Amino acid sequence: MAAHRNQTEHPALERALRAELRGEVEFDATARALTTMDASNYRRLPLGTVAPRDAADVSAALAVCREHGVPVVPRGGGTSIAGQATGTGVVLDLTRHLHRIVALDAPSRTAVVQPGVILDDLRTAAAPHGLTFGPDPSTHGRCTLGGMIGNNSCGAHSVAWGTTADNVHTLTVARYGGDTLRLGRAATTGLPDALRALPALAAANLALLRTGFPDLPRRISGYALDALLPERGTDLARAFCGSEGTLGVVTEATVRLVEAPAARALAVLGYADESAAAEAAPGLLPHHPLTVEGMAADLVRTPAALPRGGAWLFVETGGTTPAEARAHAERLLRAADALDGTVVTDPAGQRALWRIREDAAGTATRMPDGTEAWPGWEDCAVPPARLGPYLREFRALLAGHGLRGTPYGHFGDGCIHVRIDFDLLSTAGVARFRRFSEDLADLVVAHGGSLSGEHGDGQARAELLPRMYGDELVALFSRYKDIWDPDGGMNPGILARPARLDENLRFEVLPKRPVDVAFGYPHDNGDFSAAVRRCVGVAKCRTPRTTGADVMCPSYRATGEEAHSTRGRARLLHEMLAGEVITDGWRSDEVREALDLCLSCKGCRSDCPVGVDMATYKAEFLHHHYRGRLRPAAHYSMGGLPGWLRPAAPFAPVLNALARVRPLAALAKRLAGIAPERTLPVLPRRPFTRWLARRRGKGTVILSPDRVATLWPDTFTNHLSPEVGRAAVRVLESTGRTVLLPGRGLVPGSPGRGLCCGLTYVSTGRLDKARKVMRRTLDRMGPSLGEPLVVLEPSCAATLRTDLPELLPDDPRAAELAASVRTLAQYLEEYAPDWRPPRLDRPVAGQTHCHQHAVLGDAAERRLRERAGLTGELSGGCCGLAGNFGFERGHWDVSVACAEETLLPSVRAAAPDTAFLADGFSCRTQLDQLGGVRARHLAELLAEGLPPEPDAS
């Protein structure tokens, strides 16, 4: 970790915290940079962070901060959309240690949790008892119970189970200064004298509390002071929910659980437009659905899986059996008066549809034309019966301000999410943001709504609360805050006496002019700042376990550290560009250290809802960081692998023998920057290109010279696993093709010579060398350029498909070559559709290469495996070797941890006759070295099922 650069500013505070706490106290630039932002438009600079180990640590931190007059900001998953998880002073990271489910009592349907418990972990623990926690925001895989209590979060199932406040029984809370309270209904014990003023506050304002709050299911704005009314039991826990860290810190919560339906079905209803869907939603509530979610066509980029219509309602039903759940959904479908509809009972099909909805918080941040869109008015709510008219007027208001947005959300509760294409970079754009915000607040209030229906007010909307509640009730909010926090140390500037909605915008610190960069960033108009801005903080990369085929983010799952998440790295790059916390620019050690454990797996390119591409950003950073400087040894050894392997090929037997001598191997690994735990790969006797040249020379298998398949001779296939190339030739020849290398006829007698995608140079940030290699490759392609190009190594295929045109954006040949790239399965499906693969009829296990998942997709491979009778799913996640990453010194532990997440357990659980499949050389090597099994490329399995050749040499 980089040296503390902020030590001299608050040394007494830092020393006091370290003396009193057992948890981590971090005042360095990295810790501060990681917590400047949440998932909102706002940014505030903290002094440092504290990760308390227990409730006593929380109290101690609050006592020390009060003694030093420093504010405190509680922080869970950092996914708040209104700015309430940012702040000055000390940020309490409640996720690192306070994530224990203390107790789960199934008979009473309650659970006792610490604030850092991730919602999905609680749901998983409750599931064996047939229970769940009702509220479920779309960030359920990474949001925390403490954050949900702070924001009074809701989620898709609130029509059935209510908000978080509806599901909280009691709370243990630490106040600024460190004293601890237990909150529940009126029979509250241990209240200090200061809080005894709360019943008096309510008694003196009964009329205002009874009439001042709108009656709607999603009223989240402001403090829930009506929970203090005597007829509501003076529920102090409920009144605390939604206080956004401004009153105290939850250290433990007893929450209610609900019965989870044993089976679920999903009715997807199509309507002509958004207003029709909104007006239909309230009529479905008497049928007791679990959800009524809505979205329109301008959010769904690929609506092929949805019924006819311009807008849709997702209505989930439950039952004790699948048949009962389906029947419930079908009854609802018949009563819905929809344009079209379908009922989905298959769990995988339901998950695929729900993913469209859950990823909307990210996908909505980009318009179809690539324009950026931002939160700020993410979750207004109106009475459900008013939703249709409200949406029409909302769309008109957008148009009147020259803005665009894509509404979606909880139609059954009248709550709408939307990202809007505000210009938050210019003075005029920010002024328009303010005018629109004021007008929209008035529109919401005119419809009897709440400025916030789910995510809280934060800094985004609290300034406008007088428009909703009036000055008298808002003044009461401030008095309530002062009773709880007379020193004003808890999250100041939020809710009570808030900062202005156009202050502290996170964009104002970024460079005003484009940064000079190597990649073209075509999806961000060539602007690296815009690429970094893609990360809005929804933190899908912080999900602690792989789900399905997803890859992102393996290093975070291995370490659990924010700095090793895609979001964390994006935050550090943002602060590098800002230059306030991280001051060394491209030379920053803090950014380099965070990127060091990035595997460049490209998983975020596909799995991140906003398409953050950290592998590219890492290559860009390394390019600048080491420009004119000595690089790590691995950048020259493994980063220059193609250049080393070509001259080494004739000496393969000698080099293999030397590698078996342990002292020599250890010395070679030390000099090359290779992890001592790694085994050096064995070099083959003959590269693939020499084998193919000999085969062509024998002239025995040219079946149809006018039907040519062009096969890319990537470095890994050619020099490390030529058996894969030989198998691919057999498969392609079985389709009636003649297999040739690119560049034929350009260099007499040497097709394929000098061709390289540049992968290893890109991954180590040697981008000048990468462009030189890529230009040479384009020059040597000759008449092969534009022909379908079969690439066997997924990482090389991904480099040709994406990095090549992005590093050479002005060379039209780069785009032409990129467009020609096919995997073997894609080529067979497209150019040999009538070819029948051999029936292998056996189970498979192994790994889908992360670059294939992220860039190329594996749909064709799945279909080919099915046709060949290869059954079973390949692992998601990342194998952990990831090219040079797992071979580099210092990466062994993370590499093994990544493999142990899904890949190695799948190998251990495999049946005895299972074939292990991995198209990537890295994946095969990891399986060999850590799993003790020989994995093969799909081409090898297919070739084994073909009739034997007369001469297999």
Image: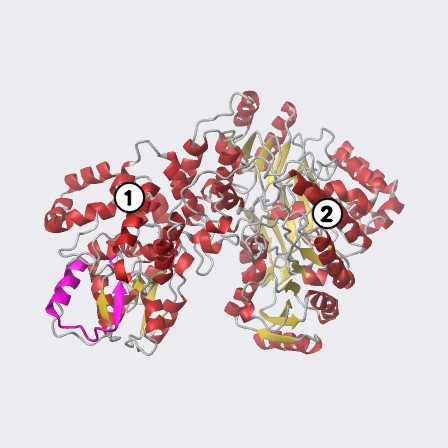
Residue 520 in percent (x, y) is at 43, 47
What is the x, y in percent for residue 769?
A: 30, 43
Q: Quadrant of residue 263?
A: bottom right
- The residue carrying mark 1 is 639
Task: Specify the segment rendered in magenta.
Answer: 689-714
Q: Which residue is mark 2?
A: 436
* Residue 893's disc number: none
The percent position of residue 812, horizontal first and vertical second, equals 38, 55
Tell me if 538 is positioned left or right of 294 in this view: left
Disc 1/disc 2 C-alpha distance (Å): 51 Å
Residue at image x 15%, y 67%? 696
Display coloring: secondary structure
- Three-letter code for the amino acid on which mark 2 is drawn: Phe
Residue 237: horizontal and vertical position, in percent?
A: 72, 46
Instruction: Tell me which numbered mark, 1 or 2, is placed earlier along the sequence.
Output: 2
Whether residue 188 is visible here, answered yes or no, is no
Q: Is residue 700 magenta?
A: yes
Mark 2, residues whose alpha carbon is within 10 Å: few (<14), some, or many (≥20)?
many
Q: Quadrant of residue 669?
A: top left
Q: Nearer the viewer, mark 1 or mark 2?
A: 2
SS at mark 2? helix
Closest to the observer: 740 or 796?
740
Relative to residue 741, is residue 217 drawn left or right?
right
Where is the N terminus found, in terms of image quarters? top left
Quadrant of the image occupied by residue 747: bottom left
Callout 1 touching callout 2 (CB < 8 Å): no
Closer to the camera in the image, 490 or 393? 393
- Taking 876 as reference, is 104 left or right? right
